[in-house]
Amino acid sequence: MDMFMKKCCGNCRQFERQPGKATDLCGAWGHPTKADREACDFWMMMVKQGKTVKAREDN
Ligand code: SF4
């Protein structure tokens, strides 16, 4: 893994591509976003296979 991965929406595990649309989707907050948008505090890098990340439940 690139340890200098850019901290932006496009590298977040919650980022969802929306083919054919002008914006993509943040799966965590449900709002439109773009790949190069500055990441929020919920940004996270990919986890190793077999490990899980507990979903945030307070949103
Ligand atoms: S807004 Fe935050 S959680 Fe949503 S895609 Fe961007 S970095 Fe990820």
Image: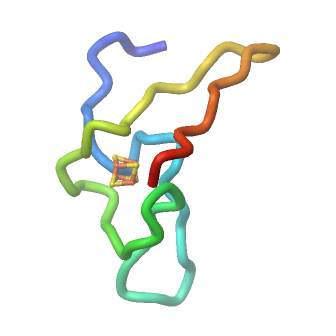
Could you say where residue 17 lies in the image, as x and y percent from the top left?
A: 53, 67
In the picture as drawn, the residue positioned furthest to the right comes out as: 50
Spot occupied by residue 47 in the image (x, y as percentages of width and height) = 61, 19
Q: Residue furthest front?
A: 58
- For this view, does 19 lie left or right of residue 11? right
Q: How is the image coloured?
A: rainbow
Give residue 7's position: percent from left, percent from top.
Answer: 26, 34
Q: Is residue 33 left or right of residue 45?
A: left
Please tell me which residue lies in front, 15 or 41: 41
User: Could you tell me which residue is drawn at 72 percent across and 22 percent down?
Assistant: 52
Compared with 15, 12 (above or below) is: above
**Rendered residue at 47%/70% (across/down):** 30
Between 35 and 25, the one lying in front of the other is 25
Relative image position of residue 43 (x, y in whole percent): 37, 37
Q: Residue pushed farthest left?
A: 38
**x 52%, y 49%: residue:** 14
Where does the C terminus fall, quadrant-wise?
Answer: bottom left
Note whether 19 is above or below 16 in the view shown.
Answer: below
Count of numbered badges drawn on the protein:
0
Relative to the observer, which residue lies in front, 31 or 37? 31
Q: Quadrant of residue 36?
A: bottom left
Residue drawn at the location 32% of the way across and 24% of the way down: 5
